[in-house]
Image: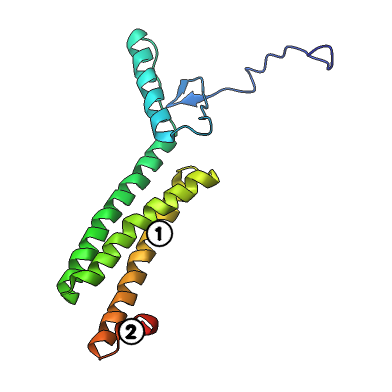
Amino acid sequence: LSDVAETEVVDDTGDSYSKVNGNPAIMLSIEKQTGYSTGDVTKRIKTRFELLEKENDKLHMTILMNQGVYIDTIVESVMEMIVGAILAVLILILFLKDIKPTLVIACSIPLSVVFAIVLMYFTGISLNIISLSGLALGVGMLVDNSIVVIENIYRLRNQGLSIRKAAVEG
């Protein structure tokens, strides 16, 4: 480096320091590489930190920010959405009393999620907080819109319209 620039060693410990809970600290910022799961990386780092603390009694590590927690929260909300989709299907069976339109909605939910994830994979979009939140929102909108359309078609069919005409009008 000294061949192309002027370099010098500077002791800036008086200007730059960190404290955690009132104690002197060394701060590390760890970032994952593209293509790796944030949740897996944070779990592996946390496991390694615990191992290092066991090996050295004087070492104490405090995690100040962990994005893996946010990813886990979003994944849990997607799982809750699956429960919500199952409840929506059960309610449709109760109110429509017809299995065919209910099966259309029940099949559209997993197919659209799989299709979205496949598209995300081929376009290089990673599973992160933003993409999972968008996916959760999209599935919710799909269920809502499917219910409205199916109920409208069902209503038109009960008014005597043909299947094709009710589907177009609905």
Residue type, numbered disc 2: Ala
User: Which is more toward the observer, 52 or 23?
Assistant: 52
Q: Is residue 125 visible?
A: no
**What number is the disc on residue 86?**
none
Residue type, numbered disc 1: Leu
User: Which is more toward the observer, 101 or 152?
Assistant: 101
Residue at the location (34% across, 18% down)?
50
Q: Position of residue 95 (x, y in %)?
A: 17, 75
Horizontally, residue 44 falls left or right of residue 85, namely right
Q: Quadrant of residue 58?
A: top left
Q: Give the secondary structure at mark 1.
A: helix
Horizontally, residue 72 falls left or right of residue 24, namely left
**What number is the disc on residue 166?**
2
Are the residues tagged 2 and 1 within 8 Å (C-beta)? no
- For the residue carrying disc 2, how many other residues have a C-alpha within 10 Å: few (<14), some (14-19), or many (20+)? some
Q: Quadrant of residue 170?
A: bottom left
User: Which is more toward the observer, 96 or 45?
Assistant: 96
Q: Position of residue 119 (x, y in %)?
A: 48, 50
Viewer-nearest of discs 2 and 1: 2
Q: Position of residue 87 (x, y in %)?
A: 21, 62
Label 1 sits on residue: 137
Badge 2 or badge 1: first in the primary sequence:
1
Residue at the location (31% across, 46% down)?
76
Image quarter of the N terminus: top right
Residue at the location (62% across, 17% down)?
13
Q: Give the secondary structure at mark 2.
A: helix
Q: Position of residue 86 (x, y in %)?
A: 22, 59
Residue at the location (40% across, 13% down)?
59
Q: Is residue 51 visible?
A: yes
Q: Can you say whether 163 is above or below 140 in the image? A: below
- For the residue carrying disc 1, how many other residues have a C-alpha within 10 Å: few (<14), some (14-19), or many (20+)? few
